[in-house]
Amino acid sequence: MSDLQLWTLVFVAITFSLYIYIAYRSRVSTTSGFYVAGGGIPAPANGAAVAADWMSAASFISMAGIVAFSQNGYAGSVYLMGWTGGYVLLALLLAPYLRKFGKYTVPDFVGDRYSESARMVAVVCAIVVSFVYVAGQMSGVGVVFQRFLGVDTTVGVIIGMVIVFFYAVLGGMKGITWTQVAQYTVLIIAYLIPAVAISVQLTGIPVPQIGFGQILEELNGLQEDLGIAAYTEAFTQTNMLNMILITGALMFGTAGLPHVIVRFYTARSVRAARYSALWALFFISLLYTTAPAIGAFSKFNVIEQLNGTPVADAPSWFESWSSVGLITHTDTNGDGVINMGAADVTELAINNDIVVLATPEIAGLPAPIVGLVAAGGLAAALSTASGLLLVISSSVANDVYYKKINPRADEKRQLLVGRIAMAGAIVVAGYLGINPPGFVAQVVALAFGLAAASFFPILVLGIFWKKCTAKGATAGMAAGLATTLAYQLWTIDIYGNSDGIFGIQETGFGTIGMLINFAVTIVVSQFTEKPTPVMQQLVEDVRYPGKTELVAAHASGELAEEELHGETHHGEHEAR
């Protein structure tokens, strides 16, 4: 066993043991604890958990790689702009109001605000979005295990499945929350240490965000010497239309992601939900302002070390990553030399998912730091995977089983169903991780498009337009999800339609789907039965400070269904 594998194994063993210990100490026996951690998580801890939930394998593993190896950094910046802007949108427009509304899940909000039919469509949307998203996380787990522990990708994914199964099934949201606090600590330390070390190595400046600015001019010159567009030049790969649409899909999708929204239900109060958002923004910014620096540093080092180098003399990291198929060199002119110029751009293919993981090796940092980064990548992937799996579990157990099939089920039965649903979701997630439909961040970007097209419009309209109707929301969600999913499937390469309509990329079509959702919801709402006066008053009260008697009665479940909707939801009112 090499030093690298040994240190990776040490850090993975320590961190996994910590996660399991936290989950054991946080085990729950109530549905409130399983779904929303009893609503008792302090704002700083909740902010760290939100950040860990948010910063998935795509953020940790792939984002810097996309920025670095999209030929230029500008094209990859859509992920930085979209994901960061989306979180601000979520914190300002949705999180506090949804917390005040007082339900466990996004489908729960949709069901109470609109109708049971809308709830079922929301359940389908939540499950589709979560499974597409979790595929990227489990795939990231496989990449880390494959390279650093020398195991097959399938074995790596299975190990990740077992760990997530243990702490997610045992502790539910409470176990997941405190585990995510630990995972955030691991991933941010693992991300910042090599970034600081490489910044000092290349620029003499210990702050990566400042060192990044120092290296850009040199990087621009290197790329221009190779006949490639400057690193900072705009619209060389992605035109303006797609830049806008992709940024929009990522931004609005962020604000509609069910696994992020549910985190705000774990806060102690509406005020705590706001402070959780503030803490989360701080924690997220530590990584998101560092990612462009890591991307630039990595690109600079790769060009410096590889371009014009004979394959036989390539550094050891090149051979290590080539041996597992994540770097591919095709010697098109047969000269035995690695060429990275515009004419030879196809000679070297670097998987976007390895950049952060490989950067410490490329910079020649010691094995313990490389092992720590591997543990950080696993922490990022597993933290988000657990949140997504809980969304799937709660959608099945709470919104389908309890609300539709067996409203008289006691807490013990509900927990059992929730845990069974979680186990089933983990098995499906593992399969998708072993057979992902693209690299990690691309798969995640598709999930954001689906979230933007399905959830964002009906959440915003549900809070800010009291006359938005149940039939309008149901039709809008269905139209947005169906058109976006159909376009994404139609434009992936296997169907030969990769150019799409008007050149719109599949990762940006979520913005179009969102506009379709808004249009259908608004038009149908004009011609269908308006919400009851009680529901309209409740929606109005939720938007203003303080908790009225109506809001308090709804949050506690004391408000009768016929008062909210004018008719009894099947079985639910009788169960009360």
Image: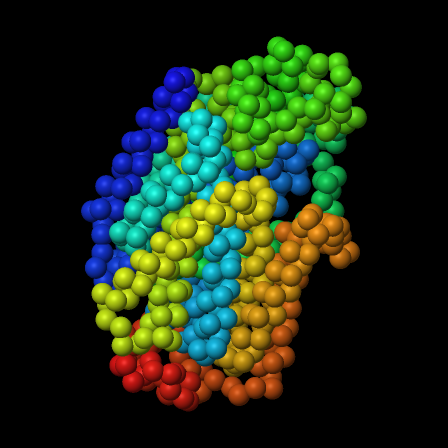
Judge whether 430 appears above or below 425 on screen: above
Q: Is residue 401 visible?
A: yes
**Horizontal placement of 239 versus 26: left or right?**
right
**x and y percent of residue 374 in the render?**
42, 30
Q: Residue furthest top?
A: 313
**x and y percent of residue 463 in the render?**
47, 72
What residue is at 40 percent from the left and 51 percent from the top?
426
**Residue 457 picture quarter:** bottom right
Instruction: Give the color scheme: rainbow, by chain, secondary structure or one colour.
Output: rainbow
**Horizontal placement of 231 versus 80: left or right?**
right
Q: Nearer the viewer, residue 293 or 400?
A: 400
**Horizontal placement of 224 versus 298: left or right?**
right
**x and y percent of residue 237 in the render?**
73, 40
On-image quarter of the N terminus: top left
Judge whether 284 appears above or below 148 on screen: below
Q: Is residue 297 visible?
A: no
